[in-house]
Image (cartoon, helix red, strand yellow):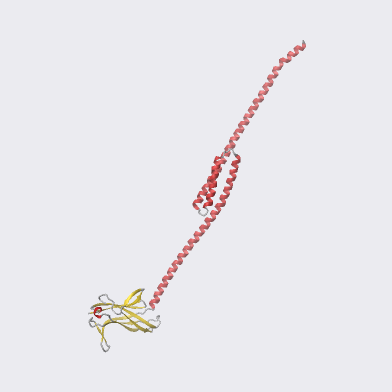
């Protein structure tokens, strides 16, 4: 009987133990759920923070690439020698921008890979821009040298022109110095008598020749020797009378009436030229005659004559 009581007592205390164990298990589970919840929220926040950081890093990489692109665009405008190399480098940057924009920010490995590629592109850009800078300096130096050379050539050209001008002036001086001078020019109509006597006349009907006399001045520059003075006589009709030979005066042809050959020793001397008309009735008329004298291709004097 006592055994039955003790067994009954044992059975009545058993549910309490089960309730206690259940409460403990529930408490542990709840605690675990709280812990896991806290950890989960922490992990989620950490993931979000990491994703945000990676997104910012991705955008920073894209910004770096955009800056590189702008640098290359500027270089293309300023440089023509390396145009193909700059365009190739720019294309690499543009392709990398397009690829990077498609990458998910959570892909850390790809972000790091593109970061390395961008680093390499920056190194290539530095080398390329060093070459561009060197070319700029070389071009600036060439431009400076070209400008200096242009100034020197201009100065040489101006000097050459001055030398030519001085040479021309000197040639004119020398030519003038070698040209005879004349004074006391006297022009008359003359008639030659049978005895050879020369008689001056102012009447056209009695005039057989036109005589031009002058004094050739002293010239120590001109070497002694044979010289020739030419005379051009134009009648009132505007005709050149006389033998009508042709000579060169200042590079142009000139019809002359007569000439005088003589020996010149550098001292003053008197010379006369006789102009004989080829057609006296037509060439010797009333009016004023113009007379011009030439030597060494230069006009050396002029005068006139009036016949009645």
Q: Residue furthest right?
A: 2
Residue 205 falls in which quadrant of the image?
bottom left
Q: Position of residue 264 (x, y in %)?
A: 37, 83
Q: Position of residue 283 (x, y in %)?
A: 25, 78
Q: What residue is rendered at 44% in x and 66% in y?
A: 157
Query: Residue 71: x, y in percent?
Result: 52, 49
- Of 199 and 151, nearer the camera is 199
From the viewer's perspective, is residue 132 above or below residue 287? above
Q: Give residue 245's position: percent from left, percent from top.
A: 32, 78
Left or right? Give the position of 285 relative to 5: left
Depth check, front residue: 258 or 24? 258
Query: Which quadrant of the structure image shows residue 183?
Result: bottom left
Farthest bottom residue in view: 195
- Image point (53%, 58%), residue name: 138
Q: Quadrant of residue 231?
A: bottom left
- Which of the image's four quarters has the C terminus? bottom left
Q: Residue at x 53, y 56 (%)?
A: 135
Could you tell me which quadrant the N terminus lies in? top right
Residue at point 41%, 72% (across, down): 168
Q: Residue furthest toward the top?
A: 1
Instruction: Please tell me how many numbered marks the rendered image carries.
Output: 0
């Amino acid at each position: 009987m006592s055994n039955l009581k003790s067994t009954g007592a044992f059975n009545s205390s058993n549910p309490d133990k089960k309730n206690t164990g259940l409460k403990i298990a529930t408490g542990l589970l709840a605690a675990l759920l709280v812990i896991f919840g806290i950890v989960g929220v922490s992990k989620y926040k950490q993931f979000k923070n990491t994703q945000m950081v990676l997104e910012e890093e991705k955008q920073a990489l894209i910004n770096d690439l955009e800056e590189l692109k702008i640098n290359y665009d500027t270089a293309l405008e300023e440089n023509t020698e390396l145009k193909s190399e700059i365009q190739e480098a720019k294309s690499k940057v543009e392709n990398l921008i397009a690829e990077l924009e498609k990458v998910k920010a959570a892909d850390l490995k790809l972000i790091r890979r593109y970061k390395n590629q961008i680093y390499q592109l920056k190194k290539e850009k530095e080398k390329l821009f060093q070459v561009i800078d060197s070319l700029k300096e070389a071009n600036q130096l060439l431009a400076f040298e070209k400008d200096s050379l242009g100034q020197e050539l201009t100065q040489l050209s101006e000097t050459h022109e001055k030398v030519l001008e001085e040479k021309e002036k000197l040639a004119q001086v020398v030519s003038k110095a070698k040209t005879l001078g004349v004074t006391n020019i006297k022009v008359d109509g003359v008639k030659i008598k049978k005895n050879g006597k020369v008689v001056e006349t102012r009447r056209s009907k009695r005039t057989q020749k036109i005589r031009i006399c002058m004094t050739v001045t002293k010239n120590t520059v001109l070497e002694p020797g044979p010289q020739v003075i030419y005379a051009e006589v134009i009648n009132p009709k505007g005709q050149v009378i006389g033998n009508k030979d042709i000579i060169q005066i200042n590079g142009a042809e000139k019809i002359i009436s007569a000439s005088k050959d003589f020996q010149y020793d550098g001292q003053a001397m008197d010379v006369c030229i006789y102009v004989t008309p080829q057609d006296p009735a037509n060439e010797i008329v009333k009016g004023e005659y113009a007379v011009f004298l030439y030597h060494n291709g230069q006009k050396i004097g002029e005068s006139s004559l009036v016949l009645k």
